[in-house]
Amino acid sequence: MRISTEISSISPLVGAEKAIRLIAEAGFDAWDFTTFDLYKPQELLGGTDCIAYARHLKQIGLECGIVCNQSHAPYPSSLDAIPLLQQAIRCTAEAGGTHCVIHPVAFEPLEKSVELYRALLPTAKECGVKICAENLVGWDDEKKESFFATGATPENFVELLDTVNDPYLVACLDVGHAEMRPAASGAPKMIHALGDRLQALHLHDNDCCYDHHQLPLTMSIDYDAVLQALREVKYKGDFTLEAVHYMLNKFTTETVADGLRTMATTARTLANRFEQE
């Protein structure tokens, strides 16, 4: 079971190149390519050198003994963003990734997301990269609670995958999103509904209400139940952390390596528990 983590919470502190090196040094097996700059996504993927940049990052990872396993495309998704998302898929392939997580169109009828993914599938097949739809929820600041967005429920997520009905569209389960009540109904239910179409994970923790993106095993999500559900569907993908706020809120340029070591230890603990029980 490989463990990995995203670079978007680390690159603002040390840059993408050093982020990959530090991820390797911390004990991760792979790195999750966030294919956008946190503040200027158009500048990175819209530029003429983005393919060369992806190849460069791949080489850095290989020199450190780790690979790119998956990526995260710019968001929010929309039909207007199709050229940018196509470029994200191409960058994923050049970096060596096999799966690109692309959000559905969050607050539009399901048909918009179906149209989006169908438009992206030719590029995905050309590049040999599977698209991973991700479960989403909305957040109401006034009510302090989640509300429905595309993929929030097992029924809606499965309907999306069934409607597109293509082996190059699979699922990434964001465990934190799946636990944001009342809009979501829990990660185990989502895992069982997705079955073998679940091929990627975003692992983090929260209070089962707000999207904290904290380190797994530090808040309220029942990871014993999550791991059991993953065993029951015979999950074969990687364990990828997306504890973005844990890194950005707790660590500095000087201490980021400490945070990554803690994250790698946590990810390995989850992977070992998954494999041993």
Image: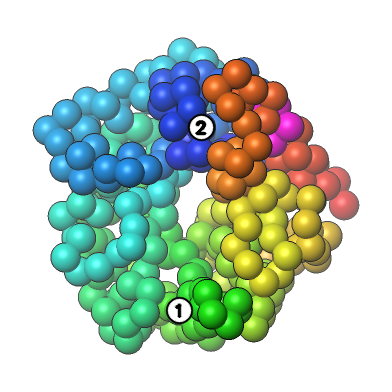
Where does label 1 land, which residue? 149
How many marks overall?
2
Where does label 2 land, which residue? 10
Distance, label 2 to label 1, CA atoms, is: 28 Å
12 to 167, vertically: above or below: above
Location of residue 259 by image quarter: top right
Give percent across and percent down for residue 77: 30, 64
| Residue drawn at (27%, 43%) of the image | 40
Residue type, numbered disc 2: Ile
| Relative to 102, 23 lies left or right | right
| Residue drawn at (22%, 25%) of the image | 52
| Front residue of 253 and 183 | 253
Q: Find out whether the residues at labels 2 and 1 contact each other: C-beta distance under 8 Å.
A: no
Residue type, numbered disc 1: Ala
Location of residue 269 by image quarter: top right
Location of residue 82 by image quarter: bottom left
Give percent across and percent down for residue 180: 63, 72
| Residue drawn at (71%, 40%) of the image | 267
Magenta stretch containing residue 261, yes or no?
A: yes
Q: Residue 145: tell me if it is visible.
A: yes
Give the mark nearer the N terminus: 2 vs 1: 2
Q: Secondary structure at mark 2?
A: loop
Q: Residue 191: tell me if it is visible.
A: no
| Front residue of 254 and 198 | 254
Q: Which residues are magenta?
A: 260-264
